[in-house]
Amino acid sequence: MPFMKGRAPIRRTMQYLEASKLVFKDEVKIFTVNYNTYGDHHKGTREFVFWYLPPIQFKNSNVQICTFKNLTPSPFIKCYYDTGRQMLIDVHNRTKEEIYDHLVKVVGKTKEVLEAETLAREKKDNPANFGVGCEKS
């Protein structure tokens, strides 16, 4: 199978891409990650980009995601909102799990909102539906 070649081919499977719990709030339009490809204090950010960025891109197809390498002395993440506001997140000396959990809390949708959106997506008005609460009795 050609898709199972390369470093960590598990990252390209649908099951792995759909397992992400980070779905950005609707206000987030651009998400940037700034880090260096060398240095110990950038290690967590490099691993975050390698392991968590593909599922984040898959789950947030309406958000522009950019990575900037070797442009900054300390790693950081910046989120741009549709209102023009910006949020700067310092990820210096953090592990990939700490970065991911912090992003879920700060810029991710809550579990309740995700469940409500899933329920709304599943409930579709179908003309074949009939009974109480439907168009046809």
Image (cartoon, grey):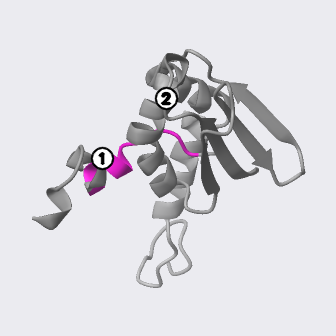
* Up-down relation of residue 44 to residue 107 (above or below): above
Q: Amino acid at mark 2?
A: Tyr
Q: Is residue 55 left or right of residue 60?
A: left
Residue in the foreground of this view, choosing between 82 and 46: 46
Residue in the foreground of this view, choosing between 92 and 24: 92
Q: Is residue 85 left or right of residue 124?
A: right
| Residue under pointer 2 | 38
The verdict on residue 20 being magenta is: yes
Residue 95 is situated, as x and y percent measured from the top left of the image, at: 47, 19
* Up-down relation of residue 35 to residue 124 (above or below): above
Give the magenta part as a residue range. 14-23
* Circle on res. 16: 1
Displayed quadrant of residue 3: bottom left
Identity of the residue drawn at 22% across and 49% down = 9
From this viewpoint, is residue 25 visible? no
Q: Is residue 40 left or right of residue 65?
A: left
Q: Amino acid at mark 1?
A: Tyr
Task: Pick out the residue farthest to the top.
Answer: 93
Specify few, some or many for label 1: CA neighbours under 10 Å numbering under 14, 14-19, or 20 or more: some
Residue 133 is situated, as x and y percent measured from the top left of the image, at: 55, 66
